[in-house]
Image (spheres, rainbow, N blue to C red):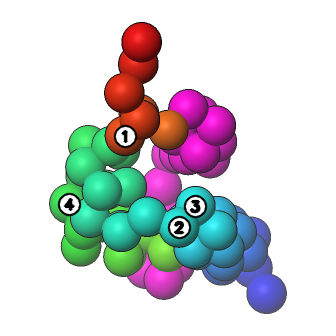
Amino acid sequence: MNHEIKMANKLLEMVNAIGVERAEIADYLGVSERTLYRWMSGDCAFPRMVFIALAVFDQFDEREEIE
């Protein structure tokens, strides 16, 4: 399995583990759902910074009201 496919699989696992709709994740990342789908399927390369952004998204649930 090549490196790009491994990264795509890791991204797919991470997105699925977050437990929110992919449209919301795509919006948070500033990309279309189609782009997110292509990244997760390994059709194209994606910035590795996506992993950091998703980790932050998962840790800080911006859907909750901040007091």
Q: Quadrant of residue 65?
A: top left
Left or right relative to 49: residue 67: left
Q: Residue at x 48, y 83 (%)?
A: 41
- Mark 4 and mark 1: Cα distance apart in space: 20 Å
Q: Main secondary structure of the magenta part?
A: helix
Please name which of the two marks, 4 or 1, marks the residue nearer to the observer: 1
Residue 40, horizontal then vertical, whole percent: 49, 74
Q: Nearer the viewer, residue 38 or 65?
A: 65
Q: Residue at x 64, y 68 (%)?
A: 17
Which of marks 1 and 3 precedes in the sequence? 3
Which of marks 2 and 1 precedes in the sequence? 2
Residue 23, horizontal then vertical, whole percent: 26, 64
Residue placed farthest to the top in the image? Answer: 67
Up-down relation of residue 67 to residue 34 (above or below): above
Magenta region: 41-60
Query: Label 3, on which residue?
Result: 18
- Disc on res. 23: none
Please name which of the two marks, 3 or 1, marks the residue nearer to the observer: 1
- Check disc 1 and give the amino acid type: Arg
Residue 18, horizontal then vertical, whole percent: 58, 61
Q: Quadrant of the N terminus?
A: bottom right
Is residue 23 at least partly visible in the picture?
yes
The kind of secondary structure element at disc 3 is helix
Query: Label 1, on which residue?
Result: 63
- Check disc 2 and give the amino acid type: Gly
Task: Look at the numbered discs 3 and 2 and tell me whether their residues touch, using CB distance below 8 Å.
Answer: yes
Task: Look at the numbered discs 4 and 2 and tell me whether their residues touch, using CB distance below 8 Å.
Answer: no
Neighbours of disc 4 within 10 Å: few (<14), some (14-19), many (20+): some
Please name which of the two marks, 4 or 2, marks the residue nearer to the observer: 2
Left or right relative to 51: residue 64: left
- Mark 4 and mark 3: Cα distance apart in space: 18 Å
Magenta-colored stretch includes residue 19: no
